[in-house]
Image (spheres, rainbow, N blue to C red):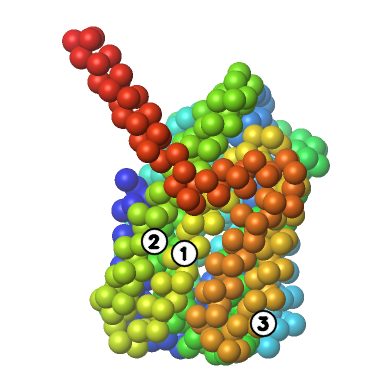
Amino acid sequence: MERALRMVISIFVFAVLAQYLGPEQFGIFNFAVAFVALFTPVLALGLNRPVVRQLIEERLEAQTLMLSVFVVRLAAAFIMIILVLVGIYFQSTTELAANLIIIIALGFLFQPFDVIALWYESQIRSRFTVFAKFAAFGLASSVKLILIAQDAPLVWFAWSNVLELALGAAFICWFYFAQTRDFSSARLRPSKVFNMLRKSWPAIPAALGISACMRLDQIMLEYLVDFRAVGVYAAGSRLSDAWFFLTGAVVTSAFPILIHHRSDDRKEYRENLGRLMLLVYCVALVIVIPTILAAEWMVHFLYGAEYQQAAEILKIHIVSLVPMAFGQASGLWIYAEWKIMLDLYRALLGVSVNVALNLLLIPIYGPSGAAVATVVSLIAAFYLFDILVPSMRQLFIQKSRALLLVGLPSELKFQMNRLGRLLNASSGKR
């Protein structure tokens, strides 16, 4: 519910901001956001899942682990800010865009506090993280609307992005220390973090690769076309990206079930993977088809006539929800089998295809070409890559069956029977 409400508010504020700034300034803002977002996945250091696992297994050492992860991630944040500054120095962009990038990159300093969110996740108390993040998001969104009402310059909207991260860090710290109070048992032991990094490091370039597939289009549009093209593209692609959370939520909820059956019943494990592929594809279809049909109306309603070209981008980009859903689902298999290097390899394939197609299509088709490049690169990474790896060919078959809706009638029958048994059990208890 929180994510759905957040999506609605986010789209509303995004649309109001787009109308206020106009395509060119909106393009400058989104170019800066995309540039910083390219570096953001590095901050997690691929440690989220390993840290949660360690926090569950070593509860007495939890505070030491949290402090150590926080310090290492904070050091990584400073390094990433330096790399952003170096990147700005070597690229040719406007002074305004460079200033926005520097401001937004300062948000890196608040992201190490997310280690507290990992602790709440290990305690199955993620509601406190949800409260903190949503409160920060709501306040930052209100600030954006106030800035629009006050006719504020573009640079203030970059600061509002930093404000959201700062508030999120402050709120989650307040929740944690209000409940835990004592942190005296924590000891700084970076070696614990580096030991985990030796196993999880492939997740860092893999996350960078997926981020590049989703963000390079806006950066390359600025270099090959102009900021106005970036603004129009961002308007259309945002309405597509907003839905990724839905398939992600389905996949996340399936993870414990898959892990359970992996050790107990391999046949059930494979069948559940097939069911998951079919489920996320059906969820994606329910979103993709209506969006394609209503794209022109949605863009006109939200953005106005200046952004009408964004409708064509939306019609293309929304298709990326299908390969992204498959990627999220097969990502569970990769982590369940602990074959993280495969995540890295498929990300590298996706980036290579993305860059090549952007260079080929953007000069000819502009923003629409960038949208095509994104969709094809995700298909390459999250579908076609499976053919190349023997251990993943079963996933390719399951995804292909899902695309053809093979097994849908039997799956519906299975779920109806399951619902019937639950209802009978419930009535029996009464």
**Badge 1 or badge 2: first in the primary sequence:** 2
User: Which quadrant would the C terminus be assigned to in this image?
Assistant: top left
What amino acid does circle 3 point to?
Leu
Q: Residue at x 55, y 80 (%)?
A: 369
Residue located beneath label 2 in the image: 288
Residue 23: name its quadrant: bottom left
- Badge 3: residue crowd in 10 Å (few <14, some 14–19, many ≥20): some
* Tag 1 and tag 2, C-beta contact below 8 Å: yes
Q: Quadrant of the N terminus?
A: top left
Name above or below for residue 68 compared with residue 296.
above
| Left or right: 294 in relation to 27 | left
Residue 196 at x, y = what percent? 75, 38
Q: Residue at x 36, y 68 (%)?
A: 292
Q: Mark 1 or mark 3, which is nearer the start of the sequence?
A: 1
Q: Which comes sooner in the sequence, label 3 or label 2?
A: 2
Pointers 3 and 2 in contact (C-beta within 8 Å) = no
Residue 418 occupies which quadrant of the picture? top left
Residue 13 position in % (x across, y down):
33, 69
Expressed as whole percent of the image width and height from the top left, the position of residue 44 reads: 64, 50
- Residue holding disc 3: 359
- Report the Cα–Cα distance between label 1 and label 2: 6 Å
Residue 220: quadrant of the picture: bottom right
Q: Which residue is mark 1?
A: 319
Q: Which structural element holds mark 2?
A: helix
